[in-house]
Image: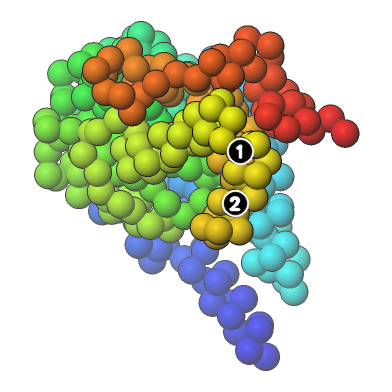
Amino acid sequence: MATNLVINNIIKRSFSSSNVLSKHINSVTVIGSGLMGSGIAQVTAEAGYSVYLVDQNDSALNKAMKTIETSLTRSTKKKFNQEPDHAVRYIKDTMDRIVTSTQVDSGAEKADLIIEAIVENIQAKHDLFSKLDKISPKNTIFASNTSSLPISEIAQAVSRKDKFGGLHFFNPVPMMKLLEVIKTHETSDATFRTLLEYGLSIGKTTVECKDTPGFIVNRLLVPYMFEAVKMFERGDASFQDIDTAMKLGAGYPMGPFELMDYVGLDTTKFIVDGWKKRYPDDPTFQSSVIIDQLVAEGRLGRKSGEGFYNYKK
């Protein structure tokens, strides 16, 4: 009886129009349908928002929608394990809130919030936001999901810098509770409050941060990982023992080398190389010979089957 009551309450919260949505946002457009973009679209639709998911081709969008459906199927098995009909309804209602398009214009015309989740290339982001700035309603808020590029630099492509901020999600988006909300020196207080409201409305725990390199998590995490690499390069300890030490001694779920393999060595290298270029006098941002070599060899971590560890076994 108690279990059924809990499930029914979840159903009501999931499908009721009384969901606590941001009062300034009804429609959200997500540009980029990769792992991050599709995850952002999913959690936004689950919260009750109308979502436009935009990418360059139908193949990418179809793959994203299948990824979202698979994710929802997995999560609803736990949410509604005694009520399969409710699970089917939940999935359908969420999927119905997502409209896909290969045209940026159609996604931007009525959007209250546009979240960019495309490749980490500053010129590509500038080109996109320059176009969005011309076609979006004047009150539309822009946000980037970048993990390494300065928000203020991305915002140079638009005139509405007061309506530009950062929303840094973590992968996998449906599971990771944290959302870093980034404010530049030109982001208005009203825009920042709206971004925080949106984050809370989709069930995330929000943390506030200025536009500093890597924001909070990556600013602390990436130098930590590279310090571990330096220890290995000096021969202080094997990478396996460093991982074991940090898991058993510090209580971390993964050691630094396991984590780099999980994130992708190319991604890790890209972040540090970018920081080093922008802040050449900061000794924290130093590249690694071993990581450069592994990336050059195509050993990128889990996604390639081998990085520091071999996953092909």
- Residue 96 shown left or right of residue 148 in the figure: right
Kind of residue indicated by mark 2 = Ala
Counting from the top left corner in percent of width and height, residue 117 is at: 45, 28
What kind of residue is marked 1?
A: Ala
Residue ID at (68%, 41%): 240
User: In this view of the protein, can residue 212 be seen by the observer?
Assistant: yes
The one nearer the camera, 265 or 153, is 265
Q: From the viewer's perspective, is 84 left or right of 180? A: right
Give the camera-side residue of 237 and 9. Answer: 237
Q: Is residue 95 above or below residue 86?
A: above
SS of the residue under disc 2: helix
Most distant residue in the bottom direction: 1
For the residues labelled 1 and 2, the Cα–Cα distance comes to 10 Å
Q: Which badge, 1 or 2, comes first in the chain's sequence?
A: 1
Q: Residue at x 52, y 63 (%)?
A: 15
Q: Are marks 1 and 2 in contact (CB under 8 Å)?
A: yes
On the rendered image, what quadrant is the C terminus found in? Answer: top right
Above or below 159: residue 138 = below
Mark 1, other Cα within 10 Å: few <14 / some 14–19 / many ≥20: some
In the depicted structure, whether residue 184 falls above or below residue 50? above
Mark 1 element type: loop
The x, y position of residue 283, in whole percent, is: 30, 24
- Label 2 Cα crowd, 10 Å radius (few <14 / some 14-19 / many 20+): some
Would you name the residue on which mark 1 appears? 237
Q: How is the image coloured?
A: rainbow
- The image quarter containing residue 68 is top right
- Given this view, does label 1 or label 2 mark the residue nearer the observer? 1
| Residue 113 in view | no
At 72% across and 62% down in the image, what residue appears? Answer: 77
- Displayed quadrant of residue 291: top right
The residue furthest right is: 313
Q: Which mark is residue 245?
A: 2
